[in-house]
Image: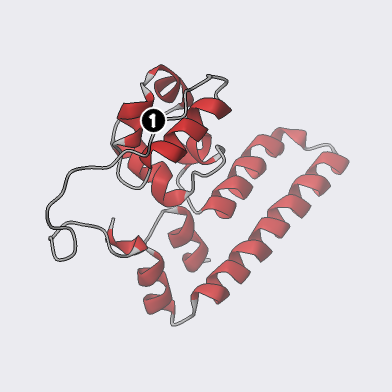
Amino acid sequence: ARLLDDWISERAERDITDEYRVGMGDVHRYVRTAEWLMYSTSEVSRVIGTGNLLPVLRRLRSRLKYGVRESLLELVALRGIGRVRGRMLYNHGYTDLKELYSAPVEAIARVPSVGSTIAQSIKKQLGIDVEETPPFTEDREETQDTPGVQTLLDDF
């Protein structure tokens, strides 16, 4: 239960695997089982007439699926946005779909781990036609040994 709580609290994958002494495959297996249990619980709830629990169960199931806090559920519902990109967008002020809708593609593309292809995909999913533009690249002289540059998923 603590492992799953850490997962939906967006704890780093490496921290979870180290603390609980399991591999990432095990974490995903526990998550999939918990997702299935939430689905089953929601179906039982629907059948026995406790439908008032359905919204809570659906949100928890989505949180388990994506490994995010509730604040990111709207963002991770977009194709191509998972827990890392969702958190990066959120931390850069794009806290909901309305913010993404009104932001220029170029601004979204500047968010670390997003880039122009994902930014264009986001806009298209929101129903906005965008011109295909060359991928956004930042001018950087040194990227290989520069501190602060992401090299692993856990470096965010």
Closer to the camera, 50 or 20? 20
Residue 155 x/y as whole percent: 28, 61
Q: Is residue 149 above or below residue 139?
A: below
Closer to the camera, 36 or 133? 133
Tag 1 residue: 95
Instruction: Classify 10 Å Cα crowding around label 1: few (below 14), some (14-19), many (20 and above).
Output: some
Residue 39 x/y as whole percent: 74, 51
Rendering quarter of residue 69: top left
Q: The C terminus appears in which quarter of the rendering? A: bottom left
The kind of residue tagged 1 is Thr
Q: Is residue 119 above or below residue 41?
A: above
As drawn, the residue found furthest toward the right would be 47
Which secondary structure lies at badge 1?
loop
| Residue ID at (44%, 27%) | 96
Residue 47 x/y as whole percent: 87, 42
Horizontal side, residue 98 vs residue 15: left or right:
right
| Residue ID at (20%, 57%) | 149
